[in-house]
Image (spheres, coloured by chain):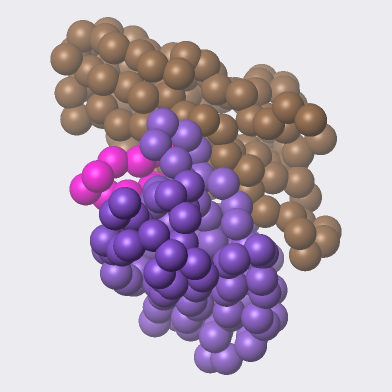
Amino acid sequence: DAGVIQSPRHEVTEMGQEVTLRCKPISGHDYLFWYRQTMMRGLELLIYFNNNVPIDDSGMPEDRFSAKMPNASFSTLKIQPSEPRDSAVYFCASSPEGKSSTDTQYFGPGTRLTVL
Amino acid sequence: GQQLNQSPQSMFIQEGEDVSMNCTSSSIFNTWLWYKQDPGEGPVLLIALYKAGELTSNGRLTAQFGITRKDSFLNISASIPSDVGIYFCAGQRQGAQKLVFGQGTRLTINP
């Protein structure tokens, strides 16, 4: 089975530009998570969705960040306008409904974002 | 955000040595997870623990869920070069989907 797919794998942009990160979760998974990883702060949960509905966006840094999940197989994380401090690796993860003890999160390969 | 206290932050060992790392928390978790992250990749689940006191093995890896439900450890026996990477613990509360992550332990193996 294909795992979580993220694109692009690397993104270099200039400050002020709009950035869109994309994620395709594992088919059949009901939950989708967006994380940010930096050396200083480690892995931080930004937002997660259940059945395409945002459940908790308390980790979204500020209004420049927005996330959508228009259908069960696709989600985007958008930063507009981007700033150098947004440079990080952004991970998408998905998990099935928690009905068994083996349900947990599976991570994508990440998008390394550099904002110049 | 809230993080688990994971230690050590880094380890430099010789190939063949055993490795031990742990995570502690001030609050209870119902599930403990251990992930490994290779350079340029996302974290990959190694072991999941669901019951206090549970001891689970996965090849050369052994992890335990502390009796108090506030800690967990991961041991790697007879380390090999491919064990190099960053190991993360994560805790999950009952009924919650959110994971709380430790800061990671960076494992380096000297040839």
Q: For residue B100, say whether it is visible.
A: no
Chain assigned purple: B
Q: Main secondary structure of the magenta part?
A: strand
Image-based side of A70 in relation to A92, left or right:
right
Rendered location of residue B69, percent (x, y): 55, 84
Image-based side of B39 in relation to A12, left or right:
right
Total numbered circles? 0
Residue bounds of the magenta highlight: A34-45
Q: Tell whether position A43 is magenta.
A: yes
Task: Give the quarter of the image for residue B34.
Answer: bottom right
Q: Tell whether position B76 is magenta.
A: no
**Front in this rendered view, residue A110 or A70:** A110
Residue drawn at (32%, 22%) of the image: A113
Task: Give the quarter of the image for residue A82.
Answer: top left
Q: Is residue B32 above or below residue B66?
A: above
Rendered location of residue A68, percent (x, y): 56, 24
Residue drawn at (32%, 71%) of the image: B7
Chain assigned brown: A
Q: For residue A62, say whether it is visible.
A: yes
Residue drawn at (26%, 10%) of the image: A13
Rendered location of residue B80, percent (x, y): 47, 55
Residue drawn at (49%, 67%) of the image: B78
- Quarter of the image with the N terminus of chain B in it: bottom left
